[in-house]
Image (cartoon, rainbow, N blue to C red):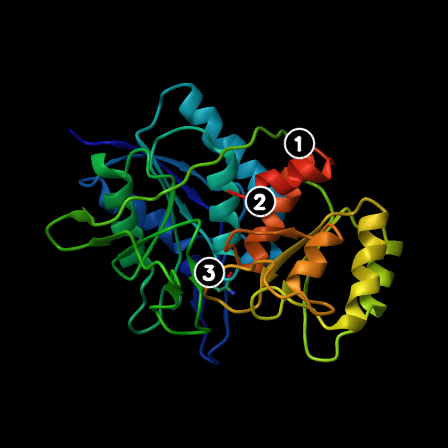
Amino acid sequence: MKKNILIIHTGGTISMSEDNNGAVSPGKVNPLSSQTSTLSNLANFFLEEPFNWPSPHITSIEMMKLKKLIDAYTEKNLIDGVVITHGTDTLEETAYFLELTVKSEVPIVVTGAMRSSNEIGSDGLYNFISSVRVASSLEAIGKGVLVVLNDEIHTADNVTKTHTSDVSTFQSPQYGPIGIVTKRGVIFHHLPAKKEKYTISSADKKVVLIKAHAGMDSTLLYAIKEIGVEGVVIEALGQGNLPPSAVPGVISLIAQNIPVVLVSRCFNGIAQDIYSYEGGGRQLKDHGVIFSNGLNGQKARIKLLIALEETTEMTEIERMFQF
Ligand code: ASP
């Protein structure tokens, strides 16, 4: 029996076209909207287009809008799955936001394209069809939010955009995809290990993400403290270390009850409190820095802004980041 799939178009290259000068931009009509009707052999569709934006325009406010839209359909038991088309630049952040906040077990698949609708080798329609097939698959139920492009199925937890233009840009460093899409079917070869959900009704906390570098000092951290920021994520060095000159800035943020979450700027591995030299992870942890469990910086930022909707208690936020 055909499944009922909610399609949510949000914009991105998948909904754009290229002009004669090679410039890519959105048009008045989303090219995917007309194509959905030609795919009626795959599923029954509900179609929503809450906005048609390039993904650099998307904020946590729009992510919350998407969560509420999905909830509205699942609460009425109207759908068997969801496919969201999205710009690839911030796709992993929206996918991870939904992973942490949508409680329904229906498959939610986020997809996009690296080549716009009228470019040679355009991957949009192909990725869209693959995503509808995954969202309709019984095996996808309960596996959380999935990201499907280029015949691969990734978890929202692990996937990241790794290349500026390659169609195989979405990878899950260290872990790999959990399934593949073939001409004959949808095959899962790994199971996602963790599941965490948070109950929030808004998502407008101010959380910033900064990257550590050799010679980093506290100037930026002191400035951040003055501008009403509610949480800070730092992509630290290696296993989770900072230059000693950045430590006073970190201490001053924590003294003001602004949580500082540390991830590594390495894209494999987990930041931990290993080194006890000045600025080393051990010392940072003693000062109250929260270590995250293998998330990249942009996802740790999403998690911190969600965590801050639930609590401002440092120990509670630390507990959430142990997952
Ligand atoms: N800049 C585009 C966006 O994220 C890239 C894409 O969709 O692939 O909207």
Task: Identify the element where label 2 is drawn.
Answer: loop
Q: What residue type is labelled 3?
A: Thr
Please report the residue visible at 61 percent of the width from the left and 70 percent of the height from the top. Answer: 237
| Farthest-out residue, left | 184
Q: Is residue 225 above or below residue 140?
A: below
Q: In the figure, residue 240 lies in which quadrant?
A: bottom right
Distance of mark 1 from mark 3, alpha carbons?
Answer: 28 Å
What percent of the width, then of the height, locates residue 72?
48, 25
Name the residue at 57% across, 37% down: 65
> Which residue position is annotated with label 1?
310
Going from N to C along the chain, the mark reached first, 1 or 3, is 3
Residue 61 location (% of width, % of height): 64, 42
Marks 1, 3: nearer the viewer: 1
Question: Mark 1 is on which residue type?
Answer: Glu
Q: Which amino acid does label 2 sit on?
A: Phe
Residue under the image location 41 percent in, 18 percent down: 76
Instruction: Count residues near mark 3 (Cα–Cα under 10 Å), then give few for <14, some for 14-19, many for 20+.
Output: many
Image point 72% across, 40% down: which residue?
314
Q: Is mark 3 within 8 Å of ligand 1?
A: yes
Which image quarter: residue 54? bottom right
Foreground pick, 308 / 214: 214
Q: Where is residue 294 in the image (x, y as percent from the top left)?
A: 50, 55
296 relative position to 129: left or right: right
Of 188 and 50, the residue lying toward us: 188
User: Which residue is label 2 attached to?
Assistant: 321
- The alpha-carbon separation of the residues under discs 2 and 1 comes to 13 Å
Q: How crowded is mark 1: few (under 14 residues within 10 Å), some or many (20 or more)?
A: some
- Is 50 situated left or right of 152 in this image? right
